Image (tube, rainbow, N blue to C red):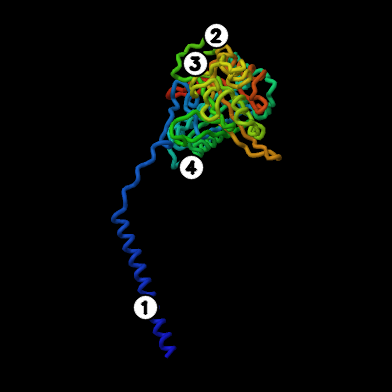
Amino acid sequence: MTGSNDISRRRLLGTAGAAGVSGLALGAAGGAGAYAAARPAPEPALTSVGAARAMFHVKHQPGITTPSQARGHLAAFDLTAGAGRKEAAALLRRWSAVAARLMAGEPVAGGAAGADTGVALDAGPSGLTVTFGFGHSFFARTGLTGSRPAALDPLPEFSADRLDPERSNGDLWVQIGADDALVAFHALRALQKEAGSAARLRWQMNGFNRSPGATARPMTTRNLMGQVDGTRNPRPSDADFDRRVFVPERPTDGTPAWMANGSYAVVRRIRMLLDDWEKLSLDRQERVIGRRKADGAPLSGGTETTDPDLEKADADGKFVIPADAHARVAAPETNGGAAMLRRPFSYHDGYDADGAPDAGLLFVCWQADPLRGFVPVQRKLDRGDALSPFLRHESSGLFAVPGGAAEGSYVGQELLEA
């Protein structure tokens, strides 16, 4: 009797199992048919970050007045032995053609680099910008010393400098910026490959900023010290913006004609001693900078964009913005009106053996004349900036960046084919 019940139970379970399998199969088939019949229309394409496009053929090279980008690469190249003016011209022609394609969101085609790597095939332009410049040594290497601008004379030495010559200067300089890391890397790799046998990489640095859309409204970026950085930058709406940042369309004072509409970039790798900085109280940090950390407003009051009142004193007669505060020492008012357009990236390259972060600022600033822009301000900072003990300048470069290339031409053509 028990055996009969077991057999009946097994038959019942077997029948149920078969029905279950059958039901599962029918359900799957029915589900697929229903999905095919009711498949929703494709979602609209994302059009914010990926679709943003900067133009290559413009009056001033891209990447100067372009808003801060989420990802950046800086690189310097030296011409190889035997490469001269002819090879440099061919290289700039290739680089310009590749940059124009990549900034349009198009793959690299042919050239010294060969086929496109495919890194960014499914991405849009993502606001990619590529900027080219020439270092002091480039002109001797190409037999063009007579065309070298006086403003490109080497920067003076500063007492706070701890410069690594292998990560400083260079014949050619490239700045890449984008709002997508893969798009930026794709451009870096393509340009490195296009260098071919004409130039070799001297140094390369990677940087980043806050991603677009990370805040509810556009805001001045913060550096790795947590400070709002770039508040008093010259603005394109300023009446004297072009005079401060760009070489005139008809250069004067002996500036060569090929620099028309160009600018000069000072590039510094500035390590921040974050372990020491973060030991300071909030009050002390704000007094070192001269601004509130929360919103970037000067200690003299107001909002971030309020001009600091450098004469305001407290009840004891002491300056509200301390005499050695960074905001005071770097202010145009205390440097004869000297100004530059700062457009940096933050960087982080790992940790030292003692656990200290190798991190800081890839400082890039633009001006019509570095002897009137960067140099006087840095000299003043070198003498008495409360921020200096928390910084270490580890590499440096100065580059002449010609105006943008017209359609059908390449960057630097007027110099190299004069």
Please give left or right for residue 120 compared with residue 310 in the image: left
User: Is disc 4 in contact with disc 2, using a CB cutoff of under 8 Å?
Assistant: no
Name the mark nearer the viewer: 1 or 2: 1
Describe the element under mark 2 as helix, strand or loop.
Answer: loop
Question: In the rendered structure, which disc, 4 or 2, sits on the residue that comes first in sequence?
Answer: 4
- Residue 350 x/y as whole percent: 63, 39
- Give the CA separation, mark 4 to mark 2: 47 Å
Q: Which mark is residue 93?
A: none
Name the mark nearer the viewer: 1 or 4: 1
Residue at point 43% right, 36% down?
49
Question: In the rendered structure, which disc, 3 or 4, sits on the residue that comes first in sequence?
Answer: 4
Which residue bears the numbered disc 3? Answer: 260
Q: Please, what is the three-letter code of the amino acid marked with disc 3?
A: Ala
Which residue bears the numbered disc 2? Answer: 253
Q: Quadrant of the N terminus?
A: bottom left
**On the image, which quarter does residue 136 sit in?**
top right
Residue lying at the far top of the rendered structure: 253
Question: In the rendered structure, which disc, 3 or 2, sits on the residue that comes first in sequence?
Answer: 2
- Residue 337 x/y as whole percent: 55, 13
Question: In the rendered structure, which disc, 1 or 3, sits on the residue that comes first in sequence?
Answer: 1
Q: Is residue 115 above or below residue 265?
A: below
Q: Please, what is the three-letter code of the amino acid marked with disc 2?
A: Asp
Residue at point 33% right, 67% down?
26
- Give the CA separation, mark 3 to mark 2: 12 Å
Label 3 Cα crowd, 10 Å radius (few <14 / some 14-19 / many 20+): many
Q: Which mark is residue 118?
A: 4
- Give the CA separation, mark 1 to mark 4: 54 Å
Label 1 Cα crowd, 10 Å radius (few <14 / some 14-19 / many 20+): few
Please give left or right for residue 95 compared with residue 17 in the image: right
Name the mark nearer the viewer: 1 or 3: 1
